[in-house]
Image: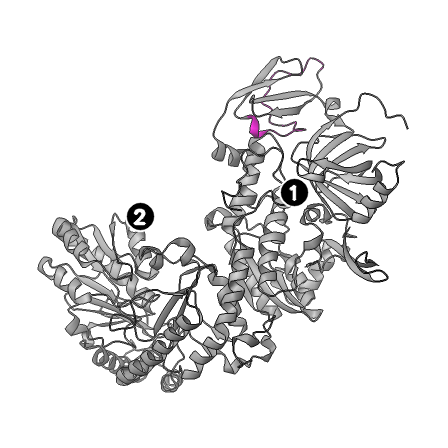
């Protein structure tokens, strides 16, 4: 196969490229330049966006003996990921820019361009597994076709299936994750060292790459300006002031700027963010707990699971699953079904947690549905609440 | 590789079939192969050793090498030996000219703060000029060019008429490295002379292709680079008249009439002199031959890709004979470059690379080319080793490459947010695609 290896300059993508070469593919390394403002990304070298990272990727490609190019995707990155990040906060939601980057940059701009240029697949250093399975082909009775399933990595700490689910099935079929089977990062580092890749000891990247100093609130204030408003409790009593409701996130505890302790002395959290009224509501932790979540913009990767649930009238579309609302959050048992949403049939997702609650579920977050290790779909949280009564079941 | 024409363009470029020794190199403006005689000269001097500043026998021998080379370089360029300041290449010579002249002039005339440069200069001139504006109180005047990248002489004249007393220097390249435009240097020199303002020219691209005579040009300073004409990288010269007030940029042992300290690289200087003499001796014949190949290339590209736009002047005495430059509508330069590279044809997008990212060329933008068009630029530059087969092989693969790059350009066209599942339910600030589907 002709494979384009996306090379960030980090150890994971370098080893992924190496494994693609060793699997016998024709591999070309491509580094995506995501910032026009090189200085902005220069400090810290977090592992994907600085000039040093581009240089590290080039050296890894040299060691592997593969051609290497830098593609400028900075306009797309700014128009999609950064603009979405700012707009979502401005609308009072909590975006995940890594999900948007996978959606719009890695598995759209890069993958589609690669396909158009003649590549069969894009390889990245993500920790997730693609399982290709033969299933009966409804279009050809008696025949089969291959479907790609996305599964968790066996490396729980590193598993990135959560941020990959958004890419959708078609693009999944054109993606390979050579690190999918690795059980630990140490193994990947050892593989890098064994091949003489100098990035083997490079630190992991964690922060948002375009917020160079990690100060998200400062970044937003720079873009959106100061918008002073009130911090209130659930009864509407004014407890303090803020510089812009957009900078707050549901579930946030620190940095509320309230000097007066709560009447009951217990910690308070952001319960809701209303950027239209420019108001932040805070209250006790238990008010954050939800067990009903609604999502939209759903992307389903497992039509068979949805079809089975829809075929059984007694289930009314519901199926048993687990949901995860944070990149490294724990999965929680739930009943899930696809419903019509704003974007059309099956764009909506309804979730009922089973004997559990989640805290701090904010609109804009990515909700990923699993059955076992398999990713069933992904949805963007629209709303969440606590059911008044336990479901009769 | 396939020679059976565009119809045979395979779905996937099969570069395993490309013999690396048979790649087509059409990027001589970036660097050109070192001439065998320059290699011999370099090796001979490397084996001999000696520091040209030493006073003993070995030093004298090395010094002799340097001075003979200086005489040879001067003769090749129509300059006097004492006017040749060896540097570590074109960028250093440009920095010395811009910074050294600015500082040198300011000592006597603090009011002379303006640096006049054409908008299409190489970064080795533009960046020192802007650096001087940021750190040394200079004022930059970017001189406009026309749609073919040619300096607007009238604009220069009116600038001088208004501000000659505040002007420190003028720098206008001999010929443009991207789109090959030969600049009206005679007119620049004529305009500057009445005011006594020194004129520097970056002649890096010109020396191998045009008749370059420093004395006849009337220039005060001129930059030459070795590796563009068959010498190794890392050697060049600033040719500067003796009376020119040049403040050093590098300070130290006082070599090169104290303008450029640092042990002179005798082997590199020898190789430079040999390659330059060889190049200048063959120049006229080479230029005629390469102009013929270039004309075939231009005609072929226009025939095979009718909407490709030649940038810079039509082939004529206004254009470097070995340069062709096109923009390909709907294509991205990096796609074109990748596809040609994987088909064994090496070209350039022609613009400066920041960490390997092709930025829209400042030269094209200055010539009024829209940014979108500027993204699809390719420069084809020929050199002493170019043959007709190079052009033929480029033309073999080009139509398929352009088709594919165009489809990739469509695939990665601006964002289509919301397309996946309809518009996002609440997205007032999402950048929706404007108008068109």
Magenta stretch: dominant secondary structure: loop
**Residue, x 82% and y 36% (percent of image)?**
A334
The foreground one among A360 and B60 is A360
Q: Nearer the viewer, mark 1 or mark 2?
A: 1
Q: Is residue B189 visible?
A: yes
Residue A258 located within the stretch drawn in magenta = yes
Do marks 1 and 2 share a chain?
yes
Q: Chain of mark 2?
A: B
Q: CA distance from mark 1 to mark 2?
A: 50 Å
Horizontal side, residue A251 vs residue A33: left or right? right
The foreground one among B411 and B435 is B435
- The circle drawn on residue B134 is 2
Instruction: Provide the residue span drawn in magenta.
Output: A245-264
Horizontal side, residue A122 vs residue A70: left or right? right
Q: Residues within 10 Å of mark 2 (few under 14, many from 20)?
A: few
The quadrant in which residue B245 appears is: bottom left
Residue A352 located within the stretch drawn in magenta = no
Q: Chain of mark 1?
A: B
Horizontal side, residue B424 vs residue B290: left or right? right
Q: Earlier in the sequence, mark 1 or mark 2?
A: 2
Secondary structure of the residue carrying numbered label 1? loop
Q: Position of residue B371 (x, y in %)?
A: 40, 54
Q: Position of residue B378 (x, y in %)?
A: 42, 66
- The circle drawn on residue B421 is 1
The foreground one among A221 and B135 is A221
Q: Is residue A47 visible?
A: no
Is B327 above or below relative to A206?
below
């Amino acid at each position: 196969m002709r494979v384009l290896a996306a090379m960030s300059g980090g150890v994971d993508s370098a080893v992924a490229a190496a494994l693609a070469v060793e699997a016998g593919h024709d591999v070309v390394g491509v580094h995506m330049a995501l910032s026009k403002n090189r200085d902005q990304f220069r400090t810290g070298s977090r592992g994907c966006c600085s000039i040093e990272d581009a240089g590290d990727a080039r050296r890894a490609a040299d060691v592997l003996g593969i051609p290497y190019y830098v593609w400028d995707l900075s306009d797309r990155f700014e128009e999609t990921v950064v603009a979405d990040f700012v707009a979502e906060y401005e609308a009072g939601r909590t975006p995940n820019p890594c999900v948007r980057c996978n959606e719009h940059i890695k598995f759209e701009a890069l993958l589609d361009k690669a396909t158009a240029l003649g590549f069969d697949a894009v390889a990245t250093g993500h920790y997730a597994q693609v399982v290709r399975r033969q299933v009966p082909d409804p279009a050809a009775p008696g025949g089969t076709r291959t479907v790609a399933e996305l599964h968790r990595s066996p490396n729980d700490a590193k598993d990135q299936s959560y941020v990959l689910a958004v890419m959708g099935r078609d693009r999944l079929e054109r993606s390979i994750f050579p690190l999918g089977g690795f059980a630990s990062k140490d193994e990947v580092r050892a593989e890098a060292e064994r091949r003489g890749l100098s990035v083997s000891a490079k630190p992991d990247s964690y922060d948002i790459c375009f917020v160079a100093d990690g100060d998200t609130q400062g970044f937003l204030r720079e873009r959106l300006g100061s918008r002073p408003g009130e911090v209130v409790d659930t009864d509407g009593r004014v407890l303090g002031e803020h510089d812009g409701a957009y900078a707050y996130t549901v579930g946030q505890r620190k940095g509320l700027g309230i000097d007066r302790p709560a009447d009951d002395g217990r910690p308070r959290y952001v319960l809701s963010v209303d950027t239209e009224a420019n108001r932040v509501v805070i209250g006790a932790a238990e008010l954050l707990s939800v067990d009903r979540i609604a999502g939209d913009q759903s992307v389903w990767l497992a039509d068979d699971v949805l079809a089975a649930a829809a075929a059984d009238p007694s289930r009314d579309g519901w199926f048993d699953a687990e949901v995860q609302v944070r990149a490294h959050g724990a999965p929680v048992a739930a009943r899930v079904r696809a419903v019509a949403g704003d974007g059309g049939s099956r764009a909506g997702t309804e979730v009922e947690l089973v004997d559990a609650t989640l805290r701090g579920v904010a609109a804009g977050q990515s909700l990923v549905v699993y059955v076992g290790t398999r990713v069933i779909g992904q949805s963007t949280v629209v709303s969440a609440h606590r059911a008044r009564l336990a479901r009769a079941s | 590789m396939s020679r059976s024409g565009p119809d045979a363009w395979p779905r996937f470029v099969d570069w395993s079939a490309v013999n690396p020794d048979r790649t087509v190199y059409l990027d001589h403006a970036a660097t050109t192969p070192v001439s065998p005689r320059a290699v011999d000269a370099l090796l001979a001097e490397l084996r001999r050793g000696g520091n040209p500043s030493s006073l003993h026998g070995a030093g004298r021998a090395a010094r002799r090498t340097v001075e003979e080379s200086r005489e040879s370089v001067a003769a090749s360029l129509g300059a006097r030996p004492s006017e040749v300041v060896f540097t570590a290449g074109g960028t250093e010579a440009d920095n010395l000219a811009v910074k050294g002249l600015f500082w040198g002039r300011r000592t006597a005339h603090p009011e002379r703060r303006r640096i006049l440069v054409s908008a299409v200069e190489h970064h080795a001139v533009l960046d020192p000029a802007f650096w001087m504006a940021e750190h040394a109180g200079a004022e930059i005047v970017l001189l406009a060019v026309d749609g073919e990248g040619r300096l607007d002489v009238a604009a220069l004249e009116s600038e001088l008429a208004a501000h000659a007393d505040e002007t420190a220097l003028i720098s206008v390249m001999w010929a443009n490295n991207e789109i090959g435009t030969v600049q009206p240097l005679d007119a620049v020199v004529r305009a500057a002379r009445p005011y006594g303002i020194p004129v520097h020219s970056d002649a890096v691209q010109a020396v191998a292709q045009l008749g370059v005579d420093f004395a006849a040009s009337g220039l005060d300073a001129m930059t030459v680079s070795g590796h563009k004409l068959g010498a190794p990288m890392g050697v060049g010269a600033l040719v500067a008249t003796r009376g020119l007030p040049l403040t050093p940029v590098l300070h130290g042992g006082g070599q090169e009439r104290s303008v450029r300290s640092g042990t002179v690289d005798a082997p590199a200087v020898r190789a430079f002199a040999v390659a330059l003499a060889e190049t200048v001796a063959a120049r006229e014949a080479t230029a005629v031959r390469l102009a013929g190949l270039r004309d075939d290339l231009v005609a072929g590209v226009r025939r095979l890709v009718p909407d490709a736009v030649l940038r810079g002047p039509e082939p004529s005495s206004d254009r470097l004979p070995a340069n062709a430059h096109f923009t390909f509508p709907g294509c991205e330069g990096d796609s074109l470059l990748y596809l040609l590279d994987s088909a064994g044809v090496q070209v350039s997008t022609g613009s400066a690379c920041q960490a390997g990212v092709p930025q829209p060329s400042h030269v094209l933008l200055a010539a009024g080319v829209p940014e979108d068009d500027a993204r699809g630029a390719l420069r084809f530059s020929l050199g002493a080793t170019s043959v007709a087969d190079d052009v033929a092989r480029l033309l073999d693969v080009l139509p398929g490459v352009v088709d594919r790059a165009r489809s990739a350009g469509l695939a990665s066209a601006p964002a289509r947010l919301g397309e996946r599942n309809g518009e996002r339910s609440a997205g007032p600030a999402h950048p929706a695609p404007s108008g068109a589907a």
